[in-house]
Image (cartoon, grey):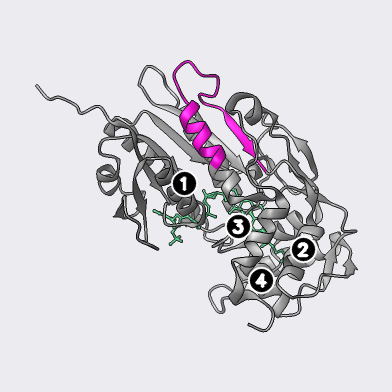
Amino acid sequence: MTTRVRPSNKRCAVIGGSGFLGRHLVEKLLDRGYSVSVFDIRQSYELPGVAFHLGDLCDKQALLPAMKDVSLVFHCASPAPASDDRGLFERVNIQGTRIVIQACIEAGVQKLVLTSSASVVFEGTDIKNGREDLPYAKKPIDYYTETKIEQEKLVLEACDKEKGLLTVAIRPHGIFGPRDPQLVPILVDAARRGKMKFIIGDGTNVVDFTFVENVVHGHILAAERLRPDSPICGKPYHITNDEPVKFWDFMSDVLVGLGYAAPRYHLPYALVYGLALLLWLLALILRPLVSFKPTFTPMRVALAGTHHYYNCERAKQDLGYKPVVSLKDGIARTVQSYPHLRQGA
Ligand SMILES: NC(=O)C1=CN([C@@H]2O[C@H](COP(=O)(O)OP(=O)(O)OC[C@H]3O[C@@H](n4cnc5c(N)ncnc54)[C@H](OP(=O)(O)O)[C@@H]3O)[C@@H](O)[C@H]2O)C=CC1
Ligand SMILES: CC(C)CCC[C@@H](C)[C@H]1CC[C@H]2C3=C(CC[C@]12C)[C@@]1(C)CCC(=O)C[C@@H]1CC3
């Protein structure tokens, strides 16, 4: 007879734990007394109390040791949204997520918390105060969004009290904070190349940006509230700063905080979107000959020129969620954490 060790409630695994969000999550979990296994394709740091397992999440045999005696798994790995590699997104976000679910079931994991994205409902048109019951985007703008939709469906459908696996999806929006490899670095790179003089559209579009510690807080609340009798099983939850802000005010605050000029001149949205589509097509056609990555992709232009902010009442009601860091403090802490990206550095 084989005896199964009951996983400790304070042992968890973070898939994607070397990444931006993953590492912040690991640090908070350690603070809260969890012991943590990180599974990632790379190791980006060392911390006492963290065991690293390196491998590709599409490889179940590589995943299983990271889930040994673990009751709770966070899945926050994904290829970077800026990539244009459809095959990679399908392999990691769709096939890989199926494998993560199978591995959880085999390893006797009780709870799986997925980092999804509020963008699963975004298709380039305004979303104002969007709730979780909005339909998934029918025409997602990029492969990242297309595969995040499938990934979320897979994880939520895998919620099965009989089989003993409970699942929930967190949908953050526009995560920023110290060590973010995307938002601030891309913005500063564009500013240094003189591309941030322009506002796309009339500059009044309102969006959500979410400080990374609030996203972590939402994940941990969801994990701790996920029980067979709780209403959160198999549901998605928006997690934002709950302080929608004008996109171009946020960009200006970050740029000015780092010593760059705020964008001033307006360009028509339709013109910039058309040009971005054209460039994207050109990059696709020329890929066998030359490789170039346009700064202004159709997705970025759509995000920069439309309203996209989300209601997080469901998270407040069911998870007891409330942001722990304000937008103002989040921006100040973020700006302070990038001395090397300051103008003149
Ligand atoms: N940043 C944002 O604004 C938002 C992010 N999200 C979601 O949050 C999650 C975390 O994002 P973020 O922290 O920004 O991203 P990061 O790229 O910083 O972190 C993702 C981590 O997963 C790793 N990874 C990628 N592919 C694999 C694989 N096949 N096997 C194992 N590990 C892999 C990455 O490695 P490598 O770097 O080598 O690829 C990286 O370490 C993602 O699921 C993303 O979709 C949702 C909403 C907004
Ligand atoms: C060049 C400028 C027009 C824009 C520079 C900033 C952008 C790089 C970021 C502004 C909004 C961000 C965002 C994401 C990535 C970085 C931005 C485009 C996501 C696409 C990351 C992954 C998600 O799930 C949704 C995010 C929405 C906001």
Q: Earlier in the sequence, mark 3 or mark 2?
A: 3
Mark 2 residue crowding within 10 angstroms, few (<14) / some (14–19) / many (20+): some
Q: Mark 4 points at which residue?
A: 294
In the rendered view, would you say 282 is above or below 66? below
Let me know if residue 95 appears in the view.
no
Q: Distance between the residues labelled 4 and 1?
A: 36 Å
Disc 3 marks a residue whose amino acid type is Gly
- Circle number at residue 253: 2
Instruction: Between label 4 and label 1, give the one nearer the viewer.
Output: 1
Mark 3 falls on what kind of element?
loop
C-beta proximity under 8 Å, tags 3 and 2 = no
Disc 1 marks a residue whose amino acid type is Lys
Image: magenta residue range: 217-240
Picture residue at 25% right of the left edge, 27% below the top: 6
- Circle number at residue 28: 1
Closest to the observer: 298 or 67? 67
C-beta proximity under 8 Å, tags 1 and 3 = no
Q: Check if residue 281 falls in the magenta segment.
A: no
Q: In which quarter of the image is residue 184?
A: bottom right
Q: Which of marks 2 and 1 is nearer the N terminus?
A: 1
Picture residue at 35% right of the left edge, 21% below the top: 163
Image location (x, y in percent) of residue 294: 66, 71
Closest to the observer: 230 or 235? 230
Mark 3 residue crowding within 10 angstroms, few (<14) / some (14–19) / many (20+): many
Picture residue at 36% right of the left edge, 49% below the top: 57
- Circle number at residue 177: 3
> Would residue 8 appear left or right of 256 to someone viewing this image?
left
Image location (x, y in percent) of residue 192: 70, 79
